[in-house]
Amino acid sequence: MLTFEAARKLILDSVSPCGVERVEILQSLGRTLAEDIVAPWNLPASDNSAMDGYAVVSADCREPGSLEVIGSIQAGGVINSVVITGCAIKIMTGARIPPGCDAVVPVEETEEQNSFVYIKEPVRKGQHIRLRGEDVREGETVIPVGTTIRAPEISMLASCGRVFVPVFRRPRVAILSTGDELVELGEPATPGKIINSNAFSLAASVREAGAEPIILGIARDNREDHRIKMREGLKADVLITSAGVSAGDYDHVRDVLEELGVDQKFWKVAMKPGGPTAFGMKDGKPVFSLPGNPVSTMVTFEIFVRPALLRMMGRQRVIRPTMKVTLAEEVRKKTGKVQFVRLLIDQDGRGFRGRSSGDQNTGILKTMLMADAMAVLPAGESLFAAGSEVDAILLREDAGMLEG
Ligand code: AMP
Ligand code: MG
């Protein structure tokens, strides 16, 4: 049977970025840059002062002495006349260095007397001057394609005069729940029925990943309903179905996807939860068929769908890192499949310590809410002693954060 790593590689090799759009700069936050950003000018644009003080000719100031103050320049101001020997110009931080000057003396190292300034210390040529282009050279690639845009990238984009930014488009992700037992949220759950919660957990996960969820509702357990709603779903960039993917009498997902011409790449993965997960492609669009148990749905989304959506949004880095966690108590599993075990995490000063968040049954949703991380326990082993180290994927953005 396929390992989850091999299945994920197969998925990532099948999908590609969705296309490019230009968005207003602040809308680009969290998106992936779709083109290299090339600096249209130097930054700083001209030599300018790093301090409040006096712009001087350094050759005049090898020793302490007085200079005549012939003008003043503030940030944003311009002085075009050349400053000659024996003279200084009062200058504020960020102001352009007047022509002829080649150093700035901080105000703290001077004394102003009438229209003269006394320079107390010898001056070094170039001191306290920020040079034109010292940060960025005109024509330099300042942000490469594929970069995730955060505040520092926004700062650089704005400094380069970008009002609009080319980013990869967000995939539209159709979410289809299947099952006769389902009722929509807000409807009464009569005996035997359960609320279609997967639609919302999937939509939330899609949105968290930065893509756009479209909830299609429920396909009842008959082929005709599956056919109609899956056709609708295939109009989006990605289709995710939940449940109906096992071998039960009322599981139609497999047959109908085949009928609709979806090229199925796999039907099962050696993992727990999430074994009955399927993946296929139709006209360049990925189709994920996830198992219906809410925990299995979320785990398989995390392992397979999220990386695929990130890749479709142009990301290079799509797989969350694992970290080493020391087990605070023994964990057992069956051999044969990788198991994802929900963990509570705390820090003991030497690193992360983890213990089970409780009942690991796929039907138990509560222990998923409690989990800070998911241990990835290898297929071949069954006993993980207290004190042993395991790999874990952090699930909670604030895991390990300190209260302040
Ligand atoms: P199935 O694979 O169709 O047998 O579904 C497995 C189990 O997942 C069902 O027995 C339900 O308990 C649960 N389930 C299926 N679909 C949903 C859904 N949309 N929301 C919440 N739970 C679901
Ligand atoms: Mg079902």
Image (tube, rainbow, N blue to C red):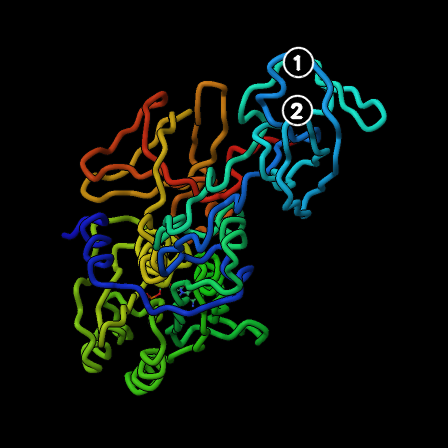
Image quarter where the C terminus lies is: top right
Which residue is at 62% across, 14% downward?
A: 122
> Mark 2: is the Cβ under 8 angstroms from ligand 1?
no
Q: Residue under label 2, please give it.
A: 105
Q: Residue furthest left?
A: 1
- 231 with respect to 120 (left or right): left
The secondary element bearing badge 1 is classed as loop
- Residue 327 horizontal/vertical position (percent): 38, 26
- Residue 103 horizontal/vertical position (percent): 59, 27
Q: Earlier in the sequence, mark 2 or mark 1?
A: 2
- Residue 137 horizontal/vertical position (percent): 42, 45
The secondary element bearing badge 2 is classed as strand
Vertical comparison of 149 with 287: above or below: above
- Residue 381 horizontal/vertical position (percent): 21, 33
Report the amino acid beneath label 1. Answer: Glu
Q: Nearer the viewer, residue 306 or 55?
A: 55
- Image quadrant of residue 336? top left
Which residue is at 21% across, 63% downward?
A: 14
Q: Nearer the viewer, residue 206 or 65?
A: 65
- Image quadrant of residue 119? top right
